[in-house]
Amino acid sequence: MLNHHPSIEMLTDYAAGSLALAYSLSVSTHLEHCSECQQHVRKLEVLGANLFTQTAPENQSLSFLKQSFFEKLTEEEQDRTSETLAENKQKSVKNWFDDYKIPASLRQFVPNNYDELSWMKLSPSVKIATLCDEDGIQVSLTRIKAGAHIPTHTHAGEEITLVLEGAFSDEKGVYGRGDFVSRNASHKHKPMVTKDAECICLTVLDAPIEFTGWLTRFFNPIMRRYHPQTQ
Amino acid sequence: MERAKQTQPDDQLVQDMFAVAEHRDQVALTRLFDHYVPKIRAFCLAAQPGANLMADDIAQEVMIRIWRKAHTYKPEAASLNTWVFTLARNARIDYFRKNSRHQTNIDPDYLFQSIVDENADPFKDAQHQRDQERIKDGLDKLPQDQKQVLYKVYLEGKTHKEAAEELSLPLGTIKSRVRLALHKLTIYIKR
């Protein structure tokens, strides 16, 4: 049973499809671990379906659209053979990867394993790899050695951290696999990884984080350089 | 055989889905087209009024997905309306992504997988059936201000924050309206 979940607002925006994809990615990864939130989303989708079916019908004739649709369908059917082949190919590849426990939502960026990403070393114990970005929101993975801490930092914007492997703690609690932790500009925190295993987290940042320690400040230009908002 | 006894229009559509899945029945697909395409178009036009070409493209795409994925539809896991809604939602997201309303390289196909289908559970399915009825009945009884916010989030595709800006209301008001509505529909009971 997980203790840290996305807010109901975020789940609603996710189920409605209005949430930015960078955040949807973190929600989707959380759902793979959390049956409680899955149930919420399932019901939120039912709500969406009810609103969807209540939309006012228009008076426009659709015969032209219908005709063009069925023409398109015929073309699709002809192209189908080649596609089935491609699909089968993908399937066999996927089974292969199942051993690695990469969440399904992340396989578009991490098809095999975490090692294949290009990791940037921030310190001897902290590495980051950027996965993607959307409208200035950055999605990356952070990999921290067992027992290490991340230097004290603040956030200019919102930071979402989803624990993929291992566990870490901060002033507010301990977070394990699947936990969804949201921190905003008012938090200044110093997370620490538990001593038993390394910790891999998915992080979503809408602005570069700022390190506040006197020595670690030198990371700030690096963090800014790698954040899409400042490019 | 039980399916045949039911006579509601929605059941006819479910029958049509089976006909499409099992017999590649294009007449059944035409009935699904007639029923859902106006709704899908309205759903798209709510997010971008006047964008008829976009609405046509997305509607066609959803119908193609219905045709291709009909065999994956499980009536015990979700109502047909819910299933089509999720297809329409995903197709709309995908369209916006490809047409650069949002600049991103994230593929939404990976984000909305049908997690529920994998663990079929008769108890949960029965519970889900009750939830569906409760949500359907409850929605009609919601006050207008709560409905309006849900409409913005679900149909216009706005986040809570965007809905607040557009209605010139504090974000807190929007949040509490949604929470009140979700509470009444028993979707969300504060944990």
Image: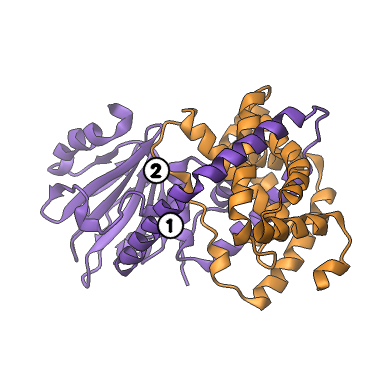
Chain colours: A purple, B orange
Q: Identify the residue at horizontal 84%, vertical 67% (top origin).
A: B4
Q: Nearer the viewer, residue A82 or A40?
A: A82
Callout 1: SS: helix
x then y, percent, for residue A48? 68, 48
Q: Is residue B43 left or right of residue A228?
A: right
Q: Nearer the viewer, residue A118 or B39?
A: B39
- Same-subunit check for callouts 1 and 2: yes
Q: Mark 1 sits on what residue?
A: A29
Q: Identify the residue at horizontal 18%, vertical 48% (top origin).
A: A119
Q: Is residue A167 left or right of residue A28?
A: left
Residue B168 seen by the camera: no
* Amino acid type for the residue under numbered disc 1: Thr
x then y, percent, for residue A80? 50, 48
Mark 2, Cα crowd under 10 Å, few <14 / some 14-19 / many 20+, is: few
Mark 1, Cα crowd under 10 Å, few <14 / some 14-19 / many 20+, is: many
x then y, percent, for residue B148? 74, 38
